[in-house]
């Protein structure tokens, strides 16, 4: 933990205006931490910066979000104001600060088998239907491809839930060429997903005991996913604001609970790119409280039992 | 705050009674088992917040056995192992298997009470978090039903509108017939 000593920052080089920059109020007692407050101008500055980094839209009314989530970084970087921090981050050619800002600002909230119904849908309808469909188009004897993408996979629970369903549905020896891809913009999230270990809180959420014992083994305070399930998935850092052309096409796309952080215009762009990346007979699954009405008319919603999925028109 | 339910497992009657008395004094609900075998039976019948178990016990089920049964039964159970002096290595093995903590004999009661207070506090926080989560999930489920119904309704309406429009735009029928046909849709 750093103790901030005001007056130590004259060496920070900023060509930009310093005159209008509000100086942090000197601490009444040296060594006593006093959270740096963000000014309305700085809220604007950071909202724009963060929007540029990851498309996440932070409204002025959510200024506290910037304060609470970036406060620690400010402190460890020994910055006495958000403006100083801003220029330090922008000037950092290693981009490390930028990554840390993204890690801090993204909401990685997720759980195993979130909402349950999409995974039942996958097991009972989507995968069997897809396989039947594909079997007729693939030359005899060659493996049927099945490419699934979790477009904001956070710490991996979504893609591993999918992997467990597939493992149970198809068994250990099958003749499918399965590719599971998890992407997220947060390095920290991808790192955890890729390592595949979860703490007690994380495994208590959504994961039935029977699956925990079957697919995980204890590792100190954590639980680690089995090599078999881990090997089914690959992870990679990816920003949904970019072009999707490097990713190729998918049969099934999960894009859940991420577009809610974007502006409507960006949601429209993202779902259009998803439409381009989906096979003609592919399936799209979005978050249970999300809607594509007014976002992407290329998709039509379809209902199966208690869940909704989307297909191209 | 609900007080913790604790199971004390030790083959030594003196340790058992010392622990029971001290814990009861702090209002913890205490039960005891005189062997690992007894403990395993009790764990499968009832939930304990904390299990305080001796590591070395005769009779086929030792502290590690108790730990494993406890964790298999319910991950919310915290297990604290009591080890004889000089058996740290065993304790470390146990920690790797999911024990939450270990204490060395002779047990420092103040230390034990402090650790239990910490566990109590943590459980309380977890309960808060889980209440919040349950409330959030309920809200989320209700709103998701509404949203999904709307989504289907809107899609259906859009489809009908498109059909009506194309009927109205048909060039092969007179206006009144087109309108009649569109209305029938
Ligand atoms: C709430 S989580 C959703 C996780 C999972 N899909 C689920 O529904 O449980 C949202 C994730 O979106 C990621 N994210 C935010 N903006 C992104 C962007 N521009 N590109 C890729 N991922 C992004 C965040 O890092 C975060 O992990």
Image (cartoon, coloured by chain):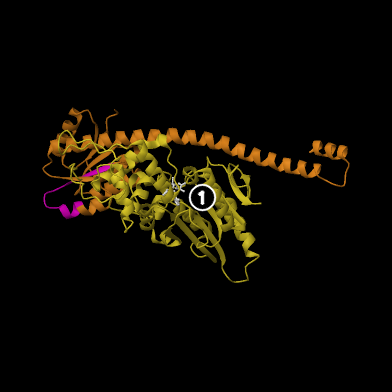
Chain colours: A yellow, B orange
Residue under the point 18% across and 43% down: A7
Nearest the viewer among B120 and B77 is B120
Nearest the viewer among A299 and A309 is A299
**From what the image shows, is residue A174 above or below residue A301?**
below
Quadrant of residue B103 in the image? top left
Q: Is residue A204 visible?
A: no
Quadrant of residue B110 in the image? top left
Note whether ligand 1 is within 8 Å of mark 1: yes
Residue A241 is situated, as x and y percent measured from the top left of the image, at 48, 53
How many discs mark residues in the rendered view? 1
Residue under the point 53% across and 63% down: A248
Residue B63 is situated, as x and y percent measured from the top left of the image, at 23, 48
Q: Is residue A188 visible?
A: yes
**Local crowd at mark 1 within 10 Å, few (<14), some, or many (≥20)?**
some
Residue under the point 60% across and 51% down: A125
Instruction: Kindly identify which chain the residue marked by label 1 belongs to.
Output: A
Residue B97 is situated, as x and y percent measured from the top left of the image, at 27, 52
**From what the image shows, is residue A18 above or below residue A177?**
above
Segment colored magenta: B78-91
The verdict on residue B83 being magenta is yes
**From what the image shows, is residue B72 above or below residue B141?**
below
Mark 1, residue position? A255
Residue under the point 33% across and 56% down: A95
The verdict on residue A104 being magenta is no
Point out the image quarter for the N terminus of chain A.
Answer: top left
Q: Is residue A10 left or right of residue A219?
A: left
- Where disc 1 sits, the SS reads strand
Nearest the viewer among A96 and B141 is A96
Residue B6 is situated, as x and y percent measured from the top left of the image, at 25, 36
């Amino acid at each position: 933990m750093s103790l901030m000593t005001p007056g130590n920052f004259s060496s920070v080089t900023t060509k930009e205006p310093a005159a209008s920059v509000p100086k942090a109020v000197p601490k009444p007692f040296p060594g006593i931490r006093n959270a740096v407050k963000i000014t309305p101008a700085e809220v604007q500055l950071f909202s724009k910066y963060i929007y540029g980094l990851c498309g996440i839209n932070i409204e002025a009314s959510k200024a506290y979000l910037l304060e609470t989530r970036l406060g620690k970084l400010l402190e460890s970087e020994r910055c006495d104001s958000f403006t100083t921090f801003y220029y330090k981050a922008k000037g950092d050619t290693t981009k490390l600060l930028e990554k840390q800002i993204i890690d801090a600002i993204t909401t990685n909230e997720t759980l195993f088998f979130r909402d349950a119904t999409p995974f039942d849908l996958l097991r009972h309808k989507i995968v069997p239907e897809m396989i039947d469909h594909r079997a007729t188009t693939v030359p005899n004897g060659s493996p049927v491809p099945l490419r699934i993408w979790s477009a904001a996979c956070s710490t991996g629970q979504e893609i591993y839930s999918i992997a467990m369903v597939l493992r149970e549905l198809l068994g250990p020896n099958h003749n499918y060429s399965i590719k599971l891809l998890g992407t997220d913009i947060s390095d920290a999230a991808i790192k955890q997903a890729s390592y595949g270990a979860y703490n007690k809180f994380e495994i208590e959420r959504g994961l039935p005991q029977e699956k925990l014992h079957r697919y995980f083994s204890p590792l100190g305070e954590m639980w680690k996913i089995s090599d078999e399930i881990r090997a089914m998935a690959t992870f990679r850092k990816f920003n949904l604001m970019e072009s999707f052309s490097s990713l190729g096409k998918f049969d099934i796309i999960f894009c859940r609970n991420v577009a809610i952080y974007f502006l409507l215009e960006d949601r429209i762009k993202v779902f259009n790119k998803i439409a381009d990346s989906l096979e003609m007979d592919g399936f799209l699954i979005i978050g249970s409280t999300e809607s594509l009405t007014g976002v992407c008319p290329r998709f039509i919603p379809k209902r199966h039992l208690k869940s909704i999925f989307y297909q191209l028109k | 705050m609900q007080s913790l339910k604790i199971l004390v497992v030790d083959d030594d009657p003196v340790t058992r009674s010392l622990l029971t008395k001290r814990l009861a004094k702090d209002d913890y609900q205490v039960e005891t088992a005189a062997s690992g075998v007894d403990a395993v039976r009790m764990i499968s019948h009832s939930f304990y917040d904390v299990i305080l178990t001796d590591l070395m016990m005769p009779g086929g089920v030792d502290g590690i056995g108790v730990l494993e049964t406890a964790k298999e039964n319910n991950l919310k159970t915290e297990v604290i192992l009591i080890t004889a002096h000089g058996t740290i290595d065993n304790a470390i093995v146990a920690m790797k298997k999911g024990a939450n903590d270990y204490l060395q004999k002779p047990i420092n009661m103040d230390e034990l009470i402090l650790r239990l207070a910490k566990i109590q506090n943590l459980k309380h926080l977890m309960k808060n978090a889980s209440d919040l989560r349950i409330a959030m999930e309920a809200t989320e489920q209700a709103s998701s039903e509404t949203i999904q119904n709307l989504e289907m309704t809107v899609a259906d309406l859009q489809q009908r509108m498109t059909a009506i429009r194309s009927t109205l735009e048909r060039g092969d029928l007179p206006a009144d017939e087109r309108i009649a046909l569109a209305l029938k849709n």
